[in-house]
Amino acid sequence: KYAGGRPDIPGTLLLEVGVNLASQTPEDFKTAVFGSRTLNVYYQYPIQLPIFQKKISLVPGIGFGFDRFKFNNNYTLAYESGDLTMSKMGLDISKSQFIANYFDVPIEIMYTKKVDDPNRSLKVSLGFRTGVLMIAFTKIRYNDDGTDIKLKTKQGWDVNTLRYGPYAKVGFGNFSLFTYSNMSTLFKADKGPDESNINTVTIGISLGGF
């Protein structure tokens, strides 16, 4: 089916942009808030439940999450004697980032106040997200005797292969504010930089209706 010249595809494409906040970090794991970003691209399919005048929906989804952490002290992840740590590796680093990309499965319960006009309605959601790590890598930029070098290093970095945790959203129509809280640590237990167990929270905005 087509609506307004476009395919009438069931469900919603959701775009989310947010900032990543890390806690329980070692001394040299210092991130820049606005450089540590998240982009989530999810497909969701709302299922109205026959309760509370159909104002409650079950909303399963599937998609990809792209997490980035920018270090404002220009340290990077490195292994020393087999242990993960934060280091400058003796380099004149001018930019340093850590990236982890996930395949995610979010599912939520959503309340819609105006069922007959959802695009202008208050919406509140509580959900739970599970994600599987696809790839993790570092990116640094440094100067070597006047030569500007960019280096990307792909390896496991002892990142947890599974992430999971609750989330909440509140908004109007297709716009909402969200917060994701990971119950899992960013790195495997006691395998983070300097044996840390780093937790992350993401806050941001959601745009749906695509």
Image (cartoon, helix red, strand yellow):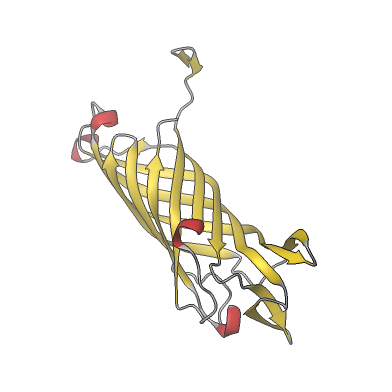
Image position, residue 28 (x, y; %): 55, 79
From the viewer's perspective, is residue 151 above or below residue 30?
above
Q: Residue at x 30, y 39 (%)?
A: 49
Using the image as rendered, state which of residue 24 and residue 124 is in the foreground: 24
Image position, residue 187 (x, y; %): 57, 73
From the viewer's perspective, is residue 167 above or below residue 193?
above
Image position, residue 81 (x, y; %): 74, 87
From the viewer's perspective, is residue 79 above or below residue 180?
below
- Seen from this angle, which residue lies furthest top? 5
Q: Residue at x 70, y 71 (%)?
A: 92
- Residue 137 lies in quadrant: bottom right
- Residue 160 lies in quadrant: bottom right
- Seen from this angle, which residue lies furthest bottom? 81
From the viewer's perspective, is residue 27 above or below residue 166?
below
Q: Residue at x 49, y 77 (%)?
A: 25
Is residue 85 among the parts visible in the rendering?
yes
Using the image as rendered, state which of residue 24 and residue 65 is in the foreground: 24
State which quarter of the image contains the C terminus: top left
Image position, residue 20 (x, y; %): 46, 60
Q: Residue at x 52, y 63 (%)?
A: 163
